[in-house]
Image (spheres, grey):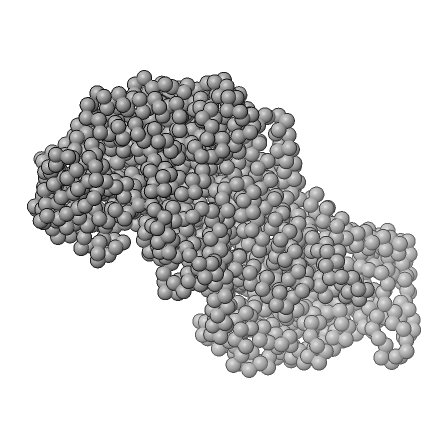
Amino acid sequence: MADNAERVSKLYKKRSSLGMAWRQLRRNKGAIIGMILLIFIIAGALLAPIVYDYNTDVIGMNVRDRMQWPSAEHICGTDDLGRDIFARIVYGARYSLAVGLVAVLIALVIGTVLGAAAGYIGGAFENVVMRICDIFSSIPSVLMAIAVVSSLGKSTINLMIAVGIASTAPFVRVARAAVLVVKDEEYIEAARAIGQPDWKIVAVHIIPNCLSQIIVQATLRVGSAIISAAQLSFLGLGVPAPAPEWGSMLSAGRLFIRDYSYMTLFPGIAIMITVLSLNLLGDGLRDALDPKLKR
Amino acid sequence: MENKGKEEITDREILNIENLRVRFETEDGIVYAVNGVNLKLGYRKTLGLVGETGAGKTTTALAMLRLVPDPPGVVECDRLEIDGQDVRGMSINRLEDVRGKDISMIFQDPMTALNPVLTVGEQIAESIEIHEHLHKDEALKKAGDMLELVGIPRARLGEYPHQFSGGMKQRVVIAIALACNPKLLIADEPTTALDVTIQAQVLELMTELKEKYNTSMIMITHDLGIVAEVCDEVAVMYAGKIVEQGSLEEVFGETLHPYTEGLFNSLPNIKNRTAWLKPIHGLMPDPTDLPPGCAFAPRCNYATEECSASCPALKNMGGTHFVACSAYERDPDFLLERRRKNG
Amino acid sequence: MHRYIIKRLLMLIPVLLGVAFIIFAIMSVAEGDPVYQVAGPDATEEQLEALREEMGLNGSLIERYFRYIGNLLKGDLGVSYVTKLDVMQLYLQRLPNTLRLASIAMLVAVALSVPLGIVAAVNQNSWKDTLAMILALLGLSMPNFWLGLLLMLLFSLKLGWLPSGGAEGFTSVILPAVTVGVGLAALLTRTTRSSMLDVLRQDYLRTARAKGVSERKVVYVHALRNALIPIITIFGVQFSNVLGGSVLAETVFAWPGVGRLVVDAIDQRDIPTVTGALIMTTMLVTIVNLLVDIIYAYVDPRIKAQYTK
Amino acid sequence: MKKKSLCLFVILSVLLALVGCSKGSSSGSSAAAPAETEAAAPVIESAGTVTSTGSVKSAEVDETTNYKDTVIIGIANDVNNLDPQGSNTDANMMVFYLTHERLVNIDPDTNEVIPALAESWTVSEDGCVYDFTLAADATFTDGTPCTAEDVKFTYDRAKDSSFAMQKVADVVSVEAVDPTHVRITLSKPNQDWLTLMAHGGMSILSKAACEKDPVKGPYLGSGMFSLEEWIPGSHCSFVRYDGYRKGPAPTRRIDLKLYKEASTRLIALQTGEIDVCIDPSTTDLQRIAEDPKLDLIQTPNVVMLYMPMQMEKPGLDNVHVRKALAHAMDKDSIVFAAYDGLATIHNNYINRGQFGLNPDIHVYEYDLEKAAAELELSGYKPGDLTFHIMVDNEAKKTAALIFQNSCAQIGINIVLEEMETAALKGKLNDAALDYELALYQFTDDLGTDYTLRNQHGSTMQEDGTLKKNGSNRCNMKDEKFNEMLDAALVETDVEQRRQDYYEIENYLDEICPIVPICTSYINIGAKKGLVGAIWKPDAKHDFRLIALPE
C-alpha cells in the first residue's frame, strides 16, 4: 500500500513542471554544450578589455605587419591594417552580443507590452495592433532593417533599433496568444473580482504565465538578431569602423578572400559558434519549457 | 510432408501465440508492457481480451500485426501464427499482404483513426486495391458496397472524415477493416469513444458482419457487458500478463482470479441498486518497475507474503479454464468471496 | 471558396497601404535633402526649388504619401534620382532575376530539406536523425553571406567550377541559390521533421499499416500529405526571408536582382528607388502569402470546408 | 544521447580539419607574400605605349586581323546616367566618349586641343569670339545630320544644367550662323576654355531628340556607337554606328558590365567572361602579371586623393588644427596599406602633370610631435576635438582608418562615415556644408586655372559676399587667392605664369585648406592582344577603337 503510494507520488514529482524543465534541460546534451559555449563567449567578451587594450591591440594598427597568416604570434593572423584578428574577434563578441541582446530586448519589451495589451484589451485595439503586426511581418526583416538603418543613419544604436524593430512582430504574436490562453482562467477572474487594476493583472498574473514562451522565443531570437546585425554590417550599414564587429570584419576580409581566406574564415566561425550555442540552448529551453512544442 | 502435418494441427486455430513479450526501451527506463502471453483462438470464435487501461491489451493486439513501433518497442515470442502462417519471421512484403487481408484491426478512437486529408472512399478502396489487385475505379466501387454494408449511403464516398460524426467514422473504420474479408478481426475497444446509443448499433453491426463473413474476432475491452454479449472466450490481462482465461461461462460463472473478481465488483449491481461499488483500490504498478512476485499482489485482498515473492504461472483449473494465482497452489479449495456468496 | 479568396483579397488592401506607408514614412525621415544629389555642384537656389517641386518633395508627409499612392495605382513609382529612369521599369528589369534566384533557392531548399526531414523523422533518434539535425542546426547558425563566401572561395576561386558572379547562363545561379537555399533548408528540415514526427504518431497511420499499406506509401502518401500542411505555411512565411536573404547573396555574387537594386540605391541615397522597390517587394511577399494560404486551404480539406461554409 | 554528442564532435572536428587544411594549403602563398611586397614597387608594363601625358595607348588596330564581334569590359562603378549634362562620374564619361562627340578633343599624346566635331576654328583678336566650322557630313547615330543648331541647343541647355553650367559660365552667346558654322562669344578671354570644351559634359546633343524626349533624348550623340541596352546596376551595351563619317569602329558591340567586387571582376576576366577588367584589386596585380593569357596595363593616374577640411566648421577654422591634421596624415602607410604600395605621395595642391606644379612645395611630413605642437598652438586640448570623415570606397576607408589611428594618438577623435560615392557627393554639394572632413579626389586636368579656381576659389556675389565655387570642398573664401588667380590667368608670359602658380601653391600651403595625399595608378587587366584602347590617367578611358583579335 504505502509502497504504491510512494511510487505514485514519485511519478507525480517527476512530472512537476519546473523541476522537470530543469531535469530536461540538464539531460539535453546539446543545451549543455550550448550553455558552456555561451559562457565561454560571454566570459571572453567580459574579459576582453582586461586582456586587450582597445586602442593598441584592437584598433591600433601596425601597417608593416599586415596580412600575416595565422602563426603562434597571431593565432588568427592579421588583417589588412596589421591588426590581430583574434583580438578583434574576442573584442567583437562585445558588439555582437550587445547588439543581439539589446535588439531582442527592444523587440521583447515593445512586443510583449503590445501583444499582452492587445490580448487583454481585445476589441478594436487588438485588431489594430494585429493588423500592424501583419504589416510589419510581411516586410522581409532584412529589408526592413536596411530601410531603418539607411534612414536613421549608421550607428551601433540605430543598428540595434533596426534589428529590434524588424523582430518585434513575433513577440507581439507570442505574447498575445499566451495572454489569450491565460486571460479566461479562473484566477484572473478572481483577481478582477477583488478589484485589481488591469495593468496589475497583466503584469502580475498574465505576463509571468507566458514568460516561458517568451524566454524561449527571446533565446532563439538573439541568434537571428546577431546574424541580422552581421548582415547589415556586411552591407556596410552596421557598426561603424574601426569597431571590430564580426560582420564588418567579414566584409573587409572579403576583398582579400582569394589570397587571404583566413580573414573571412575566423569572423564567420565566431558568428556561427555564437549563434549555434544560442540555438542549442534555445532548442533545449523550448523542449524543456514548452511541452507543446516538444518533438 | 512435415508442413502438411503442421497445417492439420494448426488448422483448428486462426491464432496461436506463445510466450509473447513486449517491452519499450525508453529514455525513462524499460517499460515491460507484455510479459509472456499465450493465446489460441479457433475459427469463428470470439475472444474477449479484458483488463484495465495499461494492462497491455492493445500492445498484445499490435504485436499480432507486428505493428509495435520499433524503436522503442522490442517484441519477442516463441510462436506467432495467424491462420497457420508464421508471422514472426515473415518478410515485410509478405507481412503487408497479411495485414488487412488475413488479419485486420479496428482501432479505439475513430476520431483519429482516419486520415483527414483522404476521402473515406479512398481510404476504404486502398485496402481493396492492395489486396485484391483491383483498378482504382473498381476498388472504389467495391468501397461503395462496403460503405452501404455498414449503413452509410454510397454517395458519401467522396467526403472527408471531418464531415462524418463519430459513430459514422467508426462505421467507416469497420468498413476499412472488413473490406477484404479478413479471417481475424481485432476490435480494440471499438465503442469506447462513442455515445451509448451508438455503441449498441456499432456492436450489433460488428457481430452481424462477423457472422456474415465467418470472421474470428478478438474483442479488446474493459466493458464486461460487451464481453458477455459477443464473446465465446475470455482472457483477463493484468500488467502484461494473462491472469485468467477460459470460456465465457467459465470466467463469468466460476471466476478464479481476485483481479477478475475485482472487475466484477467494480460494476454496478443491477439486482441490488443500493449496494456500494467495490472498486479495486490503488493503481496498476509502474510498468518500468514491476514487483518481483504477482503484479496484482499490492492490490489484492487475499495476498499473503508469498504472493510478493514469486510469480505464479498460468495453470489449468479444469476444462479450458486457466488462472495465474498462487492462492490455489497453497489451498486447492480456495474460493473467492464472489463464489462463496454465489455458492 | 471564391468568397474566401475575395475576402482575403479585400483584406490585402489595408495591409498593402500600411506596408507602403511604413516604408514611405521610414524613408522620408532619411537625413539630408535629396535634392543635392540630383543637382550638380553649381546649382542655384531657384534650380533647387524647381527640382524639389519636380521630385515631389514639397508638402507634408501625408500629402506626399497619398500623392505617391495615387501614382502607384497608375503604375508610377516615380523617377530614380540617379539614373532619371522610371523606378517601376528598374524594378521590373530586376524582378525576373530575383524570382529566378528565389524560386531555384526554394527548390534547393525543398530538395534538401523535405527528404532530410523525413529521413530524420522516420528514423527518430538514430544517427541519421542526429546527423540531419546537426546539419540543420549548422545551417541555421551560419550567416548565409558567409556560406556564400565560402562556397565562392571553394567552387569558383579554388576549383574554378562555377562562376563567381553575374546572372548569365544556368551555372551562375547555382552558388547564390545554394547560399540562399541552405539557410531555408535548415529551417524547413526542422519543420518537416517535427511535422512528420507529429503525423507519424497519429492513429490513422496505424490504420493504414493495419490494412497492409506498404511502409513507403504510409510515409510518402499518408503521412507526408498531412505533414505538408505546416510545411507549406512555413514555406510561405519563408518566401519573404528568401527575398530578404537574397539581398545578401545578390551582393556576394553580383546578382542583378531586386535586393541588389535596393542596396545600391541606398548607397546612392536614391530614395525613390529604395521606396519603390521595397514597397513592390513587400507587396509581392504579401500576395505570395495569400497564395500560400489559398493553396493551404486546398491541401487541407478541413480548412477548405470551413471556408466553403 | 551519446550518439548525438559523438556526431556533433565528429562534425566539429571535420570543420576544424577543414579550417586547418585551408590554413595549411595556403601557407604556400603566405611564403609568397613577401615576394609580392617587393614587387609592389610600381612597374609599368609594356602592354602599350606610354604617351607624354601619361596615357597608355594599346597597339593600333590592324586592318588584316579579324576582330571579335563584341568586347566586354568589366567596370567597377555603375554607369548611372546617360545624359552628358546630368552627371560627371568617370564611368559615365567613358560612355560619352563612345556615344557623343565634343566640338574639340584632347590629344592623348600631346595634351593639345585637336579638332573633333569642329573641323577648325578661329579665335578673335580679343580672345572672346570663337568661330567653329563643323564637319559637314556629321550625323547623329540615328542618321540625322548634326548641325550648328544642335550645338547652340547643347550650349543653351548647359547653361541650365547644374553640372555643366560652370564650364559655360563665360559664354555670352551662341549663334548658329549656318548649318556648319557656330559663333560662340565669351565675356572674357580664357586660356583654358577650349580644353574645357573637350570635357564629356560638353558633348553635343541632338536638338530634335531632346525636344522629343527630354529624358532619353540626350542619350543620342554623334559618336561611333549608339546605346543598345542599359540596365542600371547590371550592364550597358553599345553597337557600332556604321554611318560614322570617318568610318565605322573595328568592334561591332561594346558591353560595359558592372562587377562591383574587384575579386569577382578579375575572376570574370580569368574565366573569359569579360575581356577587360578595369581597376582590379591591387593585391591581384601579381596574378594578372603572371597569367600568360593576360596583360597588365599600369600607368600613374591623375586621380589625386586629398582630404578637404571644411574651413567654416568649429576647430577646422583654426589653421593650427588644420596643420596638426596635415602632420598626422601618414601618407607612407596609406600608400602601403591602402594601395599596396602602388601610389605616389602627393604634396602639391594641383595635380600631377598640370602646368605650374611647384616642385619645391613645402611638405607637411608625418610627425605626430609636430602635430601635437600645432594642436597646442591652436589652443585646443587633446580630447577636445572630434571630426567626422566621409569615405566612399575601401582604399579610402583604409586610409581613413590609418588617419584615425594617428589622430587618436594626438588626442583628436576621428569618426568614420562610410557612404556610396553619390551620397558623399551629395553631402559635399549640399549648400548646408554639413560635413567636416572627407577623403575625396579630383581628376581635373583641364587647366591649372580651372582646377585651382574650382577647388579653392570663390565668386563675388552681388551682395558683396563671396560664394564658394562648385568643387571648393574646403569652403575656402579668400579674396587674395582669387586675385592671384585672376592675375595668373591673364599673364601671357609662360615662365611668369608658372612662377605665379608656384606662388599660389605656396600661399595655399600656408592656409592648408586640404591635405593632398597621393596619386595612385591606373591598373587594367586585359586579354592579351587587345588593341585600340586609350588608357587615360584620369580614369576616363577611351574605348572607341578597342578590338580583340579572334
- Residue C254 x/y as whole percent: 37, 43
Q: Quadrant of residue B232?
A: bottom right
Q: Nearer the viewer, residue D226 or C123?
A: D226
Q: Quadrant of residue A36?
A: top right
- As drawn, A184 above or below D549: below
- As drawn, A283 above or below B264: above
- Residue D388 x/y as whole percent: 48, 35
Most extreme residue toward the left is D136
- Residue C178 x/y as whole percent: 43, 46
Question: The N terminus of chain B is located in which quarter?
Answer: bottom right
Q: Is residue B307 visible?
A: no
Q: Nearer the viewer, residue A139 or B102?
A: A139
Q: Residue at x 38, y 49 (%)?
A: C35
Q: Residue at x 21, y 58 (%)?
A: D212
Q: Residue at x 64, y 75 (%)?
A: B166
Number of numbered discs visible in the structure rendering: 0
- As drawn, C195 above or below D174: below
Question: The C terminus of chain B is located in which quarter?
Answer: bottom right
- Residue B234 x/y as whole percent: 75, 69
Q: Nearer the viewer, residue C139 or C12?
A: C12
